[in-house]
Image: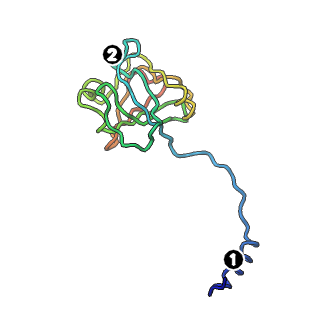
Amino acid sequence: MESGFNNIITAAAQWSSSLQIPSYTEKARTETMFFQCEVMFGSPSSNCGGNGICKIVAKNDHPFAVLRRSSCSHARAFFAASDNGKGAALLFRREWLCANLMRRHFRHGILEMPEPCPIPAGIATTLGLKIKALPAGLHLMEDCGAFIRINFLPHTEVI
């Protein structure tokens, strides 16, 4: 099959044989990894009644699906490791939180957790967490525009 570009094939063949390709070196992952989850509010010992975070459930069935609020006692969130796995963070889109949930659990920009909330083993392993539970205590909310971020660092009892 003739084409008007015979020289290109020849030139490309000669160029590729002299091409020096650097060897691949593995690099540590530096960007933040997020895990989609459903957060149930309340206290674990009170069957999810009261204040705090009762349970975290992984949501990996539709990672790119449009998320909508499922109930006023639950909220969708993104879970991430922080401080090299020594802590964790939850990011909530404001539109995923109902007004009652905001009044009850996020009043004055603080999430009060009277007791720790276990982190599912699958999430902890995937994110490389060194903690097994979100610690009890008072946790500041950080305003990130369309998101609210809550950092959970060990031994953060009082603000």
Amino acid, disc 2: Gly
Labels 2, 1: front one? 1
Going from N to C along the chain, the mark reached first, 2 or 1, is 1
The residue positioned 36% from the left and 12% from the top of the image is 46
Asked if residue 126 lies left or right of residue 71, the reply is right
Residue position for label 1: 12
Q: Where 111 sits versus 3, above or below?
A: above
Amino acid, disc 1: Ala
The residue positioned 44% from the left and 29% from the top of the image is 152
Image spot of residue 31 (x, y percent): 52, 46
The residues tagged by marks 2 and 1 sit, at their Cα atoms, a distance apart of 69 Å
Image spot of residue 110 (x, y percent): 32, 27
Q: Where 42 sits versus 90, above or below?
A: above
The residue positioned 42% from the left and 37% from the top of the image is 78
The residue positioned 39% from the left and 28% from the top of the image is 39
**Depth check, front residue: 131 or 42:** 42
Dot 1 alpha-carbon crowd within 10 angstroms: few under 14, some 14 to 19, many 20 or more: few
Image spot of residue 117 (x, y percent): 44, 21
Asked if residue 134 lies left or right of residue 27, the reply is left
**Quadrant of the frame with the C terminus:** top left
**Depth check, front residue: 97 or 81:** 97
Residue position for label 2: 49
Asked if residue 38 lies left or right of residue 83, the reply is left
- Disc 2, SS: strand
